[in-house]
Every structure is written in structure tokens, then in C-alpha cells.
Amino acid sequence: MVTVFNVRELSYPCVLRRRGLDASKKLVKRISTAKDVEVDLHNVEIISLSFLDELIFRTYLSGKLESVVFRVHDRSIEEKLERISAIRALNIKYRFNDNDIRKAALRGVVKHMPSFAESKSVSA
């Protein structure tokens, strides 16, 4: 049986990496009592990329990401999942508008983070 949690139950507001860490800790505890879990990302005004990245990555580090399916109702959230999947090289399962489960595409995997040249101060 699938257990569904709204992301608001794990943390709110969903905008900081720190809150994503808190949400992942709660999610991992709940996964230990339920085998299959869906996290509904609906009815939240803003879900930042940093929040979602931390939630997903920490859940992955705990070894529990395979048990999680994210419910997505918005194309912008789907794009964030795809971006995290590509950057972290993770398979992230999600369900868009209650359709069949999909995996976020791993296209364009980033092998390294971009580096930026140091800016030089200009003397007057």
C-alpha cells in the first residue's frame, strides 16, 4: 500500500536548503514505517530548487530514494526534478498529474561544476 505525504507535512515553507534537510530527515523516518511512499508537491506556493535538491539528495544518501515517488502537478517542478537528476546523476521517480510513474531524464549529465574566474579589482 502506498502512503502519501504532502510536502507541507515535512517542512514549510519549502524554500531553503536547511528546510530540505529537515524534510529529508522526516521523510526517511516515515519511509521506515511505510514501504512505498509518495511525496505530493502540490498546493505549495513555492518549492525552491535548493530545497528540492537537499530533500532528494539527503534521501538518496540515506538509501531510501528508491522507495519514493514524487507527485508533480506543475511543469516547473518536473523541470526541477530533471535538473537535479542531471546534476546529481540520480534516478528520481515521479508521477505527473496522477499518471504512470516516470523517471526524471538523465540527459546532459553534468560531470563537473562550472568554474568561474576570479574577478580582478580595477584601480581608479
Image (spheres, rainbow, N blue to C red):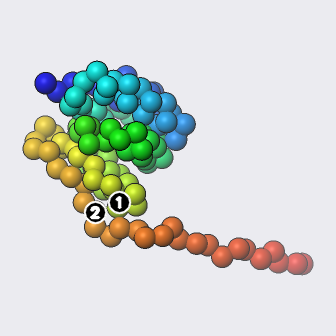
Is residue 56 in view? no
Q: Residue at x 17, y 27 (%)?
A: 2
**Image coordinates for residue 13, horizontal then vertical, percent:** 47, 30
Q: Residue at x 32, y 51 (%)?
A: 81
Q: Is residue 4 left or right of residue 88?
A: left
The label on residue 62 is: none
- Residue 101 vs 5, above or below: the answer is below
Q: Residue at x 81, y 74 (%)?
A: 121
**Image coordinates for residue 88, horizontal then vertical, percent:** 40, 57
Residue holding disc 2: 106
Residue holding disc 1: 89
Of the numbered discs 1 and 2, the one sitting upstream in the chain is 1
Looking at the rendered image, the quarter that the C terminus falls into is bottom right
Q: Is residue 19 left or right of residue 32?
A: right
- Residue 16 vs 25, above or below: the answer is below
Q: Looking at numbered disc 1 in the image, what kind of residue is underneath it?
A: Ala
Q: Secondary structure at mark 2?
A: loop
Q: Nearer the viewer, residue 94 or 77?
A: 94
Is residue 20 in view? yes
Distance (Cα) linking label 1 and label 2: 6 Å
Label 2, residues with CA under 10 Å away: few <14, some 14-19, many ≥20:
some
The image quarter in which residue 24 lies:
top left
Q: Secondary structure at mark 1?
A: loop
- Residue 85 vs 93, above or below: the answer is below
Instruction: Specify the farthest residue to the left.
Output: 100
Q: Is residue 104 left or right of residue 122?
A: left
